[in-house]
Image (spheres, rainbow, N blue to C red):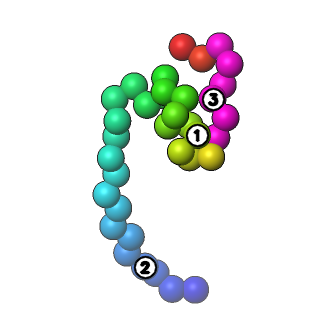
Protein backbone atom coordinates (compact mmCIF):
# COMPACT_ATOMS: atom_id res chain seq x y z
CA UNK A 1 0.00 0.00 0.00
CA UNK A 2 1.13 3.52 -0.74
CA UNK A 3 -0.34 7.00 -0.78
CA UNK A 4 -1.08 8.65 -4.11
CA UNK A 5 -2.30 12.07 -5.16
CA UNK A 6 -5.22 12.09 -7.55
CA UNK A 7 -6.07 15.19 -9.55
CA UNK A 8 -9.36 15.17 -11.46
CA UNK A 9 -11.08 17.49 -13.87
CA UNK A 10 -14.85 17.15 -13.87
CA UNK A 11 -17.23 18.54 -16.45
CA UNK A 12 -20.83 19.07 -15.42
CA UNK A 13 -23.55 19.43 -18.01
CA UNK A 14 -26.71 21.22 -16.96
CA UNK A 15 -29.76 18.96 -16.62
CA UNK A 16 -27.71 15.82 -17.28
CA UNK A 17 -29.98 13.84 -14.95
CA UNK A 18 -32.92 14.49 -17.29
CA UNK A 19 -31.09 13.40 -20.47
CA UNK A 20 -31.40 9.71 -21.38
CA UNK A 21 -28.43 9.99 -23.77
CA UNK A 22 -26.11 10.91 -20.87
CA UNK A 23 -27.20 7.76 -19.04
CA UNK A 24 -26.48 5.65 -22.14
CA UNK A 25 -23.01 7.20 -22.47
CA UNK A 26 -22.26 5.99 -18.93
CA UNK A 27 -23.65 2.51 -19.63
CA UNK A 28 -26.72 3.09 -17.45
CA UNK A 29 -30.43 2.71 -18.08
CA UNK A 30 -32.58 5.83 -17.90
CA UNK A 31 -35.02 5.40 -14.99
CA UNK A 32 -38.71 5.40 -15.91
CA UNK A 33 -40.76 8.15 -14.30
CA UNK A 34 -37.73 10.29 -13.53
CA UNK A 35 -38.34 14.03 -13.36
Report helix, strand or loop for mark 3.
loop
Instruction: Give me the C-alpha separation between circle 3 and circle 1.
Output: 7 Å
Tell me the residue at 53%/45% (across/down): 25
Tell me the residue at 32%/47% (across/down): 11
Report helix, strand or loop for mark 2.
loop
Q: Is residue 32 above or below residue 23?
A: above
Front residue of 2/22: it is 22
Question: Which of the marked residues, 2 or 3, is nearer the chain's N terminus?
Answer: 2
Tell me the residue at 52%/34% (across/down): 21
Tell me the residue at 34%/36% (across/down): 13
Q: Is residue 30 magenta?
A: yes
Look at the numbered discs 3 and 1 and tell me whether their residues touch, using CB distance below 8 Å. yes
Q: Looking at the rendering, which quadrant does residue 9 occupy?
A: bottom left
Look at the numbered discs 2 and 3 and tell me whether their residues touch, using CB distance below 8 Å. no
Question: Which of the marked residues, 3 or 1, is nearer the chain's N terminus?
Answer: 1
Instruction: Give me the C-alpha separation between circle 2 and circle 1.
Output: 31 Å
Q: What residue is shown with label 3?
A: 30
Front residue of 14/25: it is 25
Question: Which of the marked residues, 2 or 1, is nearer the chain's N terminus?
Answer: 2
Q: Position of residue 17 (x, y in %)?
A: 49, 28
Q: Is residue 19 above or below residue 27?
A: above
Q: What residue is shown with label 2?
A: 4
Quadrant that contains the C terminus:
top right
Q: What residue is shown with label 1?
A: 24
Residue interval drawn in magenta: 28-33
Callout 1: few (<14), some (14-19), or many (20+) C-alpha neighbours within 10 Å? few
Amino acid sequence: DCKVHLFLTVKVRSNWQDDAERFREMGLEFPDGAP
